[in-house]
Image: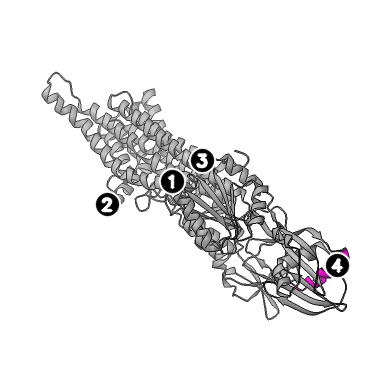
Amino acid sequence: MSMSHNNKNTCQGSDCCHQHEQHSHEHHHDNEGVNWWKPALSMAMLLAGIIFSKTGVQWFQNDWIRIAWYAAAWLPTGLGVLIEAIEETREGELFSEFLLMTVASIGAFAIGEYPEAVAVMALYCIGEALQDLAVDRARDNIEALIAFRPDQAIVIRDGERETISPALVNIGDTVEVRPGERVPIDGRLTSEAAAFDTAALTGESVPRIIERGGEVLAGMIASESTVRIQAIRPASESAVSRILHLVEEATERKAPSELFIRRFARVYTPVVVGLAAMVVLLPWLYSLVVPTFNYGITEWLHRALIFLVISCPCALVISIPLSYFAGIGAASRRGILFKGSNYLDVIASIETVVLDKTGTLTTGQFAVTAVSGLSESQMAMVAAIEQNSTHPIGQAIINYRQPADVMVTGLKDIAGYGMSASIEGKIWTVGTTRLLEREGIDYPATLHDTCGTIVAVAIDGVYTGHILLNDQPKDDAAVAIAELHRLDIKTVMLSGDKQTIVSDVAERLGVDEAHGDLLPQDKVEHIKQIQNNGNQTVAFVGDGVNDAPVLALSDVGIAMGALGSDMAIETADIVIQTDQPSRVCDAVMLGRHTRRIVKQNIIAAIAIKVLVMILGIFGVANLWEAVFADVGVALLCVLNALRLMRAPSAGKA
């Protein structure tokens, strides 16, 4: 079932209690569009008619008055269903639930069961209205994303402030955002460093400090000061717009279970119509052969009508897609964006999760973990050399030690190797061991076996010492690996870093296998090998840019923390906004929970319907029970599907 917030139909005039599109029971509702007065009026007249009959009201005993009364009670709900049945028949959908309801209610009128005829339509429409409210509840978590997208922007043009729609902001325009306001468009910060509340996009509870020149995304909130940003993307391509588009597209991509139910309903409905006809015809034929058999057309027609009412497949056709829709909604609330409900099915079957290291399990931010052979004053000199570097390693050294207030001259930045400079007449060489080799400087061979990133330091051509830096694991990385193991999923780490570093991180986090020194093509070969080894279903978790080939090759590609990356959204099947590896576990649990609920709904709906159909054929169940059973089964399945909205997170299952 596909639901779109941008194309909602409301039921008005002669429309039925809900609209169907493309014969697939695709509901498009909002709460205001449900005409509650129609089923309410029908039910009020129905109850009044029953009371009049039971209390022996004189004027109501006339047959024509009774027919007119119940016909009037039938019109508010029945007319819309009748019109919808005619329209769907014209479009080729002959055996729709509308036709079944229409045949059942008209048949009830024909055999004099006027209250049942009204009840079929009134209770059906009440049930549909309640289901629509349940659908709206599932949609709320996704529609809440719209609130992240501001409807106006303050643009600075020719020194003047102008308030316009974000859609009218051009790339390069300067946009001003005041404290407490949402950023209306993706851009680069042109004012001083500022704090932003990013909870709406990333789930981070602590405000993020963005430096001048850093990227600011639409939906963030300026926390403390007025800031200015320069637009880098049109509003239609902003982070929030892409998220909304992604979620809307997700409901269009059907899971195998949904596609099966669609095909099942198209075969099932004409079959039950044929069986209903047989319920009437076979006893008649039997009475021709066995004259002692007392055949009454009214009784068997009544049983056939009960069979038709209970046979409506709406419990399956509505609740199964709703289960996936609720799963997608619950995931989006956790910052997990599925590109289609089919990926909920696939991730439920994952046996191995392969993870990139940097940016996935680790922060991608270096920190100094040890200093060997260098005094504090020498470290301050190294920091003075690195203070002009934008490389993460240089920034980590500056964060570790305040730069010395000295004159640095002859600074050379040797790409891929390091830096050299002159301080107080001495030549300092700072960089990789390859830089020392290039300069002909001897150093201890044991540096090659050191686990971590080495910054070697030499003064006037003599090795002095080294700085050890390591990429730090994310706060929830160890929890994520432990949770994946609890879910009986094997973990593998692939990285371009050297093997000693990768093995160290894997050991600290508890990863099953770790492979380092890999190029992108090597990662592809590893994924193929895992997939071919025992036909395993594999998910790959990476940054969505450098890992595009393996994201595409894996059964499920998951992009971590890639909100601003077009490559992540294009290549990955699932995008995790929060940059938390534990959300991978949430995605797996949601997939499994969704699959379990879908199976429960299929089994329950078919079992209950078959039971009541059999009871109806043997005259045990009446038309009232059939209607209540049909609506009740559908509602139970819907409520079961909505349990997904409260699915547990990693570590809470």
Along the line of sight, the residue nearer the viewer: 92 or 578? 578
| Helix, strand or loop at mark 2 | loop
**Label 4 Cα crowd, 10 Å radius (few <14 / some 14-19 / many 20+):** some
Q: Amino acid at mark 3?
A: His
| Helix, strand or loop at mark 4 | helix
Residue 386 colored in magenta in the image = yes
Q: Is residue 261 above or below residue 45?
A: below
Q: Residue under circle 4?
A: 378
Q: Are marks 4 and 3 in contact (CB under 8 Å)?
A: no
Q: Quadrant of the C terminus?
A: top right
Quote the CA–CA distance across marks 2 and 4. Answer: 83 Å
Q: Residue under circle 3?
A: 593
Q: Which mark is residue 321?
A: 1
Q: Are marks 2 and 4 in contact (CB under 8 Å)?
A: no
Q: Amino acid at mark 2?
A: Gly
Mark found first going from the N terminus, 4 or 1: 1
**Which region shows up in magenta?**
376-390
Q: Residue under circle 2?
A: 92
- Of labels 4 and 1, the one closer to you: 4
